[in-house]
Image: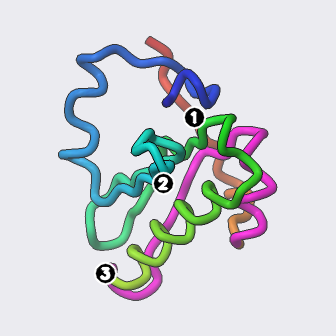
């Protein structure tokens, strides 16, 4: 799904544990049972929650599946976390309008950073 949806590819070893170690995750399957959209939350369960790996198969885009995944994940955080959780994500260009429509704002003055390997 990552590669099909335009996210960076990962190895089988990198993919082995994410669903087990994620705080929450959401998948949407089509009528044939194939993965159509996904997303997950990394977090400590108390204050910090990072939404990651939100992707929709191009064959299923523009149908509200990405929004449904995001709304499910946000709802779960709101329902299960203590008040005022800190929810973050890294918004790639294709998803930014969706994230903004859900209330996300730029994290200025902070800037998302990564350590290349």
| Up/down of 52 relative to 88, above or below | above
Q: Which residue is pictured at 41% across the width and 18% down the height?
A: 10
Q: Nearer the viewer, residue 83 or 103?
A: 103
- Residue 83 in magenta stretch: yes
Picture coordinates of residue 85, whole percent (x, y): 44, 76
Evaluate if marks 2 and 3 touch, with contact meaning CB atoms under 8 Å apart: no
- Where does the magenta region start and end? 80-102
Q: Which residue is mark 1?
A: 113
Q: Residue at x 64, y 62 (%)?
A: 67
Q: How is the image coloured?
A: rainbow
Q: Position of residue 4 (x, y in %)?
A: 58, 24
Instruction: Work out how far the residue at label 2 is from the one at label 3, CA to CA, in angstroms.
Output: 15 Å
Image quadrant holding the C terminus, namely top left
Q: Nearer the viewer, residue 112 or 73?
A: 73
Query: At which x and y percent is residue 59?
Result: 67, 36
Mark 2 surroundings within 10 Å by alpha-carbon count, few (fewer than 14), some (14 through 19), many (20 or more):
many
Q: Earlier in the sequence, mark 3 or mark 1?
A: 3
Which image quadrant for residue 24?
Answer: bottom left
Identify the image quadrant of residue 112: top right
Direction from residue 53 to residue 97 in the image, left or right: right
Residue position marked by numbered label 3 in the rendering: 80
Q: Residue at x 45, y 50 (%)?
A: 29
Question: Sequence order check: which comes first, mark 2 or mark 3?
Answer: 2
Query: Image check: 82 left or right of 109?
Result: left
Distance in Å between CA atoms under marks 3 and 1: 28 Å
Q: Residue at x 73, y 64 (%)?
A: 105
Residue to which mark 2 is pinned: 51
Q: Residues within 10 Å of mark 1 (few under 14, many from 20)?
A: few
Q: Which mark is residue 60?
A: none
**Horizontally, is 55 left or right of 51 in the view?**
right
How dense is the environment of label 3, judged by Cα within 10 Å: few (below 14), some, or many (20 and up)?
few
């Amino acid at each position: 799904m990552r590669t099909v949806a335009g996210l960076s590819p990962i190895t089988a070893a990198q993919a082995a544990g994410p669903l087990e170690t994620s705080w929450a995750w959401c998948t949407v399957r089509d009528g044939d049972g194939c993965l159509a959209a996904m997303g997950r939350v990394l977090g400590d369960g108390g204050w910090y929650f990072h939404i990651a790996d939100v992707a929709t198969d191009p064959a299923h885009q523009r149908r509200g599946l990405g929004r449904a995944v995001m709304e499910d994940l946000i709802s779960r955080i709101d329902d299960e976390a203590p008040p005022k959780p800190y929810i973050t994500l890294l918004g790639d260009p294709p998803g930014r309008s969706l994230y903004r429509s859900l209330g996300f704002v730029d994290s200025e003055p902070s800037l998302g950073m990564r350590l290349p390997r």
